[in-house]
Image (cartoon, grey):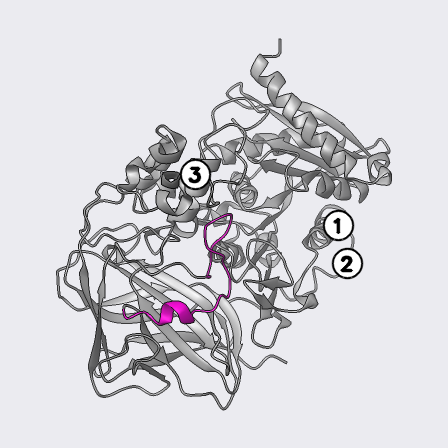
Amino acid sequence: MISKRRLIIRFCSFVLLFVGTFLTTAQVSNDIRILRYQAVPMSDGVVLYADVYLPVDAGRYPTIVVRTPYGVQRDGMHQTMTRMAQRGYAVVLQDVRGRYESEGIWEPFRDEAEDGTATIEWAAAQPFSNGKVATQGGSYLGHNQWAAASQKPPHLVAIFPGVASTNIYANWLSMGGAFRLSFNYGWGVVRMPNRIMLPQYWHTADFTTENLKYQNILRHLPLNTGDIQSAGGVVQHYRDWLTHESYDEYWKSISDEERFAQITVPSHTYGGWFDIFVQGTVNGYVGMRNHGGTPEARSGARMIVGPWGHGPSRAFGGVEFGDHAYVDLIERQIDFYDYHLKGIDNGIGDEKPVRIFYMGINKWQSEDDWPIPGTNFTGLYLTSEGKANSVTGDGKLTFNQVSNSGQDGYRYDPLLPVSTTGGNNCCGTPTAAGPRDQREIEAREDVLVYTSDFLTEPVTIAGQVTMKLFAATDGPDTDWMVKLVDVAPDGYAMPVSEGILRAKFKDGLDKINLLTPNEVYEFEIAMTPTANVFLPGHRIRVDITSSNFPQFARNLNTGAPLGSSAETRVAQQTIYHGGARLSQIILPVVPEVK
C-alpha cells in the first residue's frame, strides 16, 4: 500500500514532470521511452526509486547511472537524460536514499558508496542494459560517482564527475581548516534537511523577518545553535560537521582521495577556476593520473577547466570571457561514453589529457599533464616601509629577494570582518562569486596590499598557487586569508586565486595545535589552482587579511572549538618580510601560451 506521504511526493513529481514535458518539444517526447518509479533494492532492504530513460526501440544499451539528492525532475534533468537516451543510452536517474521518492534516512555523503555500487550492479542486470555502465553528474552527484567507483563495481566502465569535491572535509566543508559558513549553512541547514528541497528563497533580503535575513542569520553566534535560527530545530549533520572540525576519521572514512588506488576505470573531471570545488576537480584528475588502480585508469584520466563557476558559461562574475569560453559538456560526456562504452574511435584516446582556459588572454590550450611539465615555481616577495595597509599603502611585490627585514601590522576584529567579494563560492550564497573587483575591500586598513611594478613582459601561470607567510598574532588562533589579484591598467582588481588557513592547522588539517601568542611562525597557505596571463601594463597583487565573511566563518581569535562559543576578541596581526623571513607568493610559471 502506498503511504499518504509517498502519494504527496508522487503528486509533486508528476507536476514537475508535466511542466518539464510541456517545455520539451513533441519530437523529444516521442523519441524515447521512460519507465517511471523503478524500484532498486539496497542490501539493507531499503528501496530507492529511479526513472529510466530509454531509446524508443527495444534492445540492450550501454547504461548511465545518475544519482541525485535534488529530485529527478529538477533543473533540466529531464532534458539532459532525454538527450542521452536519444543518443543510444539507457539512463537510470535515481533519488538517493531518503530523498524525494526513495526510502530510508538521508545522512549527507554517508551511504553513497554502497548505494551507488548496488544501483550500478542493478542497472547492469536489467533487460535494457548490455552490462556496460558509466556514471554521470556534477557537484553532489559527482561525489556520488567517486564514492561508488572506489568500491570497484564489476560492471562499471567509466565515470564523469564534474564540479565535485574529492575530499568532503578539505575541499567542501572547509578550506585550510576554515569552515565554509555561507555554503554549508545554506545547503546543509536551510535547503537540505527536508526530504524535498526548499525553494532557493532563503538568501533573499525578504526571507521572512528582519531577524531571519540571511546575512543576519550567518552572524549568529555560537554557530552550533545556528540551525535553530532557520530550521527551527536541531540539524544533526550540521552539528556533527562543527564537532568534527579537523580531518579526523569521521571525514577520512568518506574521503575519495583516500581511495584513488581502488578506482580502476577511466575518469573525466571538469570544473571552473571560480568554482567552490575547483580543488576537487584538479585533485580528481591528479589522483587518478598518478594513483589510479589500473593502467587504463591512469592513462584514461581527463580534465577540462574553464573560467567558470559551478558550471560552464561565457561570462562570469562581471567579466566577459568570450563565446568560445562556453563548452557543451553534455556533448563532451556523450563523446566520452561513446569512446569507452561503445568503442567508437572519436579521438579521445589520442588527445592530450588536460584542457584549460587561460584567463587574461582568454584562450584554451591542451596540456600534457597537471602540473604542467616544466612548471617553474617562482616566488614574488613581499616588502614595504611598514605601512602596507590598504591599496594606498606602500606594500610592494618583487621578483627579487629582499635583504632588508620589515613588518606590517593590522587589527582584526571578528565583529567587523572583511566582506566576501567574489572568489570561489556558489549556490545561492549572499555575495556573487567570480572575478569581482577587489578595490572596495582593498581600501580597508585591515587589508594588507602588496603590488608589483607594471609588467613589461607577460607572466603566464597555470597550476597550484602557494603563499609562504611569516606571521604572528597576539592570541591562540586566527585566520590568514590571501588573494592573488590581476590589476588591469584601469585599476580593475580581478582575483584569480585565493586561499585561507586557520592558523591552528599549521601542522596539518588532522592536527589542532594552538599558537603561542606573539611567536613568529612560517605558515604555508594552499591557494586555489588557476591559469592566467598577467599581461604587459598589468600588475600582480597580493591581498592579505584575516577574514572573508560570510564565505568563511569568522575566527573568533580565542582558540575555542569551532562553533562552541560566542566570545570574540580583537587580534593584533603582524606580517614579516625580507631578510631571514622571506614571505612570498609562489606562482606556477609556465611557457607562454601558443
Left or right placement of residue 341 versus residue 308 in this view: right
Specify whether residue 17 is painted magenta. Answer: no
Q: Position of residue 454 (x, y in %)?
A: 45, 88
- Residue at 35%, 35% in the rendered image: 229
Q: Residue 413 is drawn in which quadrant?
A: bottom left
Disc 1 residue type (three-letter): Asp
- Cα gap from disc 2 to disc 1, whole angstroms: 8 Å
Mark 2 or 3 closer to N-term? 3
Q: Is residue 292 above or below residue 485?
A: above
Disc 2 residue type (three-letter): Asn
> Is label 2 in contact with label 1 (beta carbons under 8 Å)?
yes
Question: What residue is pinned by disc 1?
Answer: 338
Specify whether residue 431 is painted magenta. Answer: yes
Element assignment for label 1: helix
Left or right placement of residue 234 versus residue 59 in this view: left
- Asked if one can make out residue 130 in the rendered structure from this viewpoint, the answer is no
Between 267 and 12, the residue placed more toward the observer is: 12
Element assignment for label 2: loop
Label disc, if present, on residue 346 of the rendered structure? 2
Label disc, if present, on residue 188 of the rendered structure? 3
Left or right placement of residue 379 versus residue 204 in this view: left
The mark tally for this picture is: 3
Left or right placement of residue 533 versus residue 120 in this view: left
User: Which circle, 3 or 1, is nearer the viewer?
Assistant: 3
- Residue at 23%, 85% in the rendered image: 385
Boundaries of the magenta span: 422-445
Disc 3 residue type (three-letter): Gly
Position of the N terminus, as image quadrant, is: top right
